[in-house]
Amino acid sequence: MPKYYTWNKSSRKFIQRKQGKPIQEYPDVYSTDVFGRIYSVHPSNDECFYLRLEACQRLKLLENDDHWDQTLNDAAISSSAQQIRTLFSIILCTCYPSKSIDLWIKYKDHMCDDILYQIRNRMGNLNIQINEEFFNEALISIEDMCLMMSNKLLIQLCLIAPNRPMHDVFNKEVHREKTYDLNNLKELIQKNLSLLNEQQKYVFDTLMKVTNNDTGGIYFLDAPGGTGKTFLATIRSQNKIALALASSGIAATLLEGCRTAHSALKLPLNMQSNAFQSCNISKKSAMAKVLQQCQLIVWDECTMAHKKSLEALNRTLKDIRGNHNLFGGAMILLAGDFRQTLP
């Protein structure tokens, strides 16, 4: 198109070029060697992305979803309903199928098998059949996973929105951080407190004093083993939100309820691409509710993290919490060992 036409802004349409290399056998037709550019739209720009997607669908410019159809068909043969829902959530969040609703309609029965089984057992009636309520439960489960993976609701991914109050969606993450077993936490506290040496006990008491005064601040622990776990459990036992993060997946397995910082905070993969990075967390998202209410953030193995990761968290907390103090007034506990980290 750009070879033979130019875009006229006033009339908002392409017109034939009046200059350039004449084309033989076609009078008044000229060409040039210019290159045209089509601007890309990231899926995070929901309205523009899905508007273009629908336009391309109607013009039949897109590949069909046969490969995703075959993927789900293979999974339906041997996988559980929960596994199929997980696979479908991954496809929605990372692959952006052109007709996600068609995939849902075709495989929704397979995604509800476990829900049907549970209801039949609970009601003692094997004649119960799948209905819209079962499909709604499956959509809620899929949306919960999409929120965890991409911080998006199903309606933002061009799928049917489940029928549930909006506050249930946003309280999902908050509920996750407040449902720890209090008895197990108290046992852990009693066991670990008696094992702390004099220095560790001093660190623990200092941190508890700061937390109880709700003054916030940032602290660094030079890897005194056990102190962070005990402190984390104590805050959670008071029914307060204490978010546990780690720089690596292995480190994340050592703290209960811990996630990698990149997963929880939606940190950019390339921290050096921008001088002023921030976390990809919307103020209206489920994770934003957690960050607004959290009393403490523990970041284990922080010595492995890029300094811009902390700067991104600082900017995000200030914005989400509406507080211009360091890290939005939240208490940040960093733990790690520089002796284990190469320069």
Image (tube, grey):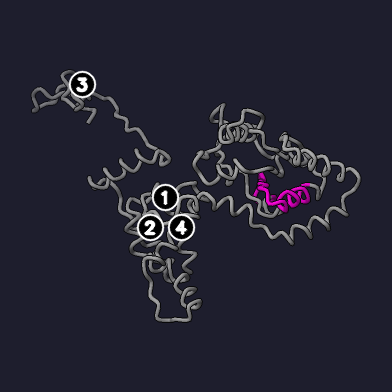
Q: Is residue 295 above or below residue 31?
A: below
Q: Amino acid at mark 2?
A: Trp
Percent coordinates x, y for residue 96 in the rendering? 39, 49
Q: CA distance from mark 2 to mark 1?
A: 9 Å
Q: Is residue 244 visible in this depiction of the protein?
A: no
Q: CA distance from mark 4 to mark 1?
A: 15 Å
Q: Which mark is residue 313?
A: none
Question: In the rendered structure, which segment of residues is drawn in magenta?
Answer: 228-251
User: 37 left or right of 232?
Assistant: left
Q: CA distance from mark 4 to mark 3?
A: 46 Å
Percent coordinates x, y for residue 194 in the rendering? 88, 54
Label 2 secondary element:
helix
Instruction: Identify the image quadrant of residue 40.
Output: top left
Percent coordinates x, y for residue 81 in the rendering? 46, 67
Q: Nearer the viewer, residue 5 or 139?
A: 139
Q: Amino acid at mark 3?
A: Ser
Characterize the local packing of mark 3: few (<14), some (14-19) or many (20 or more) Cα atoms within 10 angstroms: few
Instruction: Identify the image quadrant of residue 67.
Output: bottom left
Check if mark 2's residue and mark 4's residue have beta carbons within 8 Å: no
Q: CA distance from mark 3 to mark 1?
A: 37 Å
Check if mark 4's residue and mark 1's residue have beta carbons within 8 Å: no
Q: CA distance from mark 2 to mark 4?
A: 16 Å
Label 1 secondary element:
loop
User: Is residue 143 found inside the magenta-colored segment of the image?
Assistant: no
Residue corresponding to mark 1: 95
Please report the residue visible at 49 percent of the width from the left and 47 percent of the height from the top.
Answer: 150
Residue corresponding to mark 2: 68
Q: Which mark is residue 10?
A: 3
User: 161 left or right of 86?
Assistant: left
Mark before the other along the chain sequence, 2 or 3: 3
